[in-house]
């Protein structure tokens, strides 16, 4: 169990380390099984794998897919992140990711356009400079960082709270794949679908339960265990749902590099007796 991290980001999305430096940092931490799971992109994988050659570490192919779901009783759409792991045939997923990248590129521009009326300036070029000019890499993290650097907010969290999180003026929903389609395409790619950080979407306990049940009904494979900093009661609730819906578990730090210094690479929650790790199914 120790030495596994199945949820990490490089600078292909909103991490700060290149894929190579991420692998190097993982080696220093004694990690032997590392999944690179950038937002809607598998573009860092080859670099990570090349760097890992002849090193005591296995790179698991991965991606964190921006997905969405809804309850039939309400019209509301909820955002959800599905981590895809260990794809044997990445083609179907790559096809869909090409569309997700177009959505991401357009959304980055839309958020910056909406911000103009909030802050009185257009920061799009500065945001683009943070992603080597590649617009499909823009995440809200890059936008938040740019707002900090321009002195418009003091911390990235403030940028979310004031402007770009759900309900705020410059929020733009990621209108990507639905949950069922996401799981389906991951399975077509012969990978495993993991429900990422179920307690981090601001959902009520009822909705977390509904989401996990829905995920299981679409044949989702595993649920990520909450980090140990979350309250014990939260972990116990997730443990119960995992057992009830007969799901496997996944462990990942969601490491992003030094702009989220409280998240340490390789820092993963403890797996309880009776829980089955998704890594045991890796091919
Ligand atoms: P995006 O995929 O463009 O919506 O960006 C999502 C990323 O922004 C997440 O992966 C987090 O790294 C970060 N993020 C999302 N919500 C928040 C928040 N409320 N505060 C700080 N960072 C956040
Ligand atoms: Mn992120
Ligand atoms: Mn996420
Ligand atoms: Mn993540």
Image (cartoon, helix red, strand yellow):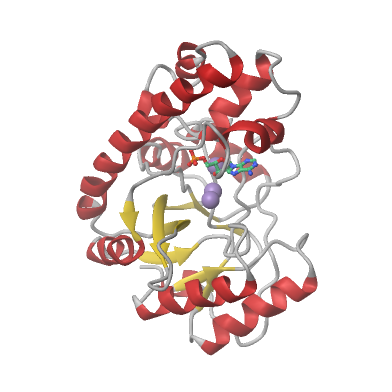
Dividing the image into 4 quarters, which one contains the C terminus? Answer: bottom left
Dividing the image into 4 quarters, which one contains the N terminus? Answer: bottom right
Observer-nearest of 273 and 224 = 224
- Can you give x and y, in whole percent of width and height, for residue 130 in the image? 51, 19
Observer-nearest of 253 and 81 = 81
Q: Is residue 128 above or below residue 208?
A: above
Ligand 2 quadrant? top right
In the rendered structure, the answer to whether residue 215 lies left or right of residue 150 reads left
Q: Which residue is drawn at 34% across and 75% down?
A: 218
Q: Residue at x 50, y 19 (%)?
A: 127
Number of labels in the image equals 0
Can the viewer see residue 259?
Answer: no
In the rendered structure, the answer to whether residue 265 lies left or right of residue 33 reads right
- Can you give x and y, in whole percent of width and height, for residue 264 in the image? 71, 47
- Can you give x and y, in whole percent of width and height, for residue 269 in the image? 69, 65
Q: In this view, does 93 lie above or below 247?
A: above
Identify the image quadrant of residue 110. Answer: top left
Q: In this view, does 229 lie above or below 153?
A: below
In the rendered structure, the answer to whether residue 216 lies left or right of residue 160 reads left
- Can you give x and y, in whole percent of width and height, for residue 213 in the image? 46, 79
Can the viewer see residue 245?
Answer: yes
Identify the image quadrant of residue 119. Answer: top right
Q: Residue at x 70, y 36 (%)?
A: 157
In the rendered structure, the answer to whether residue 146 lies left or right of residue 125 reads right
Observer-nearest of 8 and 141 = 141
């Amino acid at each position: 169990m120790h030495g596994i991290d199945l949820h990490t980001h490089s600078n292909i999305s909103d991490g700060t380390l290149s894929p190579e430096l991420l692998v190097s940092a993982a080696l220093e931490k004694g990690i032997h099984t590392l999944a690179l799971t950038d937002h809607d992109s598998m573009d860092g994988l080859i670099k990570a794998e090349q760097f890992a050659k002849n090193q005591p570490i296995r790179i698991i192919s991965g991606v964190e897919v921006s997905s969405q779901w809804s309850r039939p009783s309400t019209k509301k759409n909820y955002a959800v992140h599905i981590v895809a792991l260990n794809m044997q045939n990445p083609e179907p997923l790559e096809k869909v990711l090409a569309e997700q990248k177009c959505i991401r590129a357009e959304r980055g521009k839309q958020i910056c356009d909406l911000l103009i009326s909030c802050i009185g300036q257009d920061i799009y070029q500065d945001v683009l400079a943070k992603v080597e000019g590649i617009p499909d890499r823009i995440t809200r993290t890059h936008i938040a960082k740019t707002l900090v650097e321009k002195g418009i907010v003091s911390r990235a969290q403030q940028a979310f709270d004031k402007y770009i999180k759900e309900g705020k003026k410059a929020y733009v929903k990621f209108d990507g794949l639905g949950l069922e389609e996401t799981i389906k395409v991951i399975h077509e790619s012969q990978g495993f679908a993991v429900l990422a950080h179920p307690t981090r979407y601001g959902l009520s306990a009822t909705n977390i339960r509904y989401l996990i049940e829905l995920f299981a009904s679409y044949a989702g494979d595993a649920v990520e265990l909450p980090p140990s900093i979350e309250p014990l009661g939260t972990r116990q609730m997730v443990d119960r749902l995992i057992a009830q819906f007969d799901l496997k578990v996944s462990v990942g730090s969601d490491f992003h590099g030094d702009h989220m210094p409280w998240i340490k690479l390789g820092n993963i929650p403890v797996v309880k007796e009776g829980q089955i790790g998704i890594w045991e199914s890796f091919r």
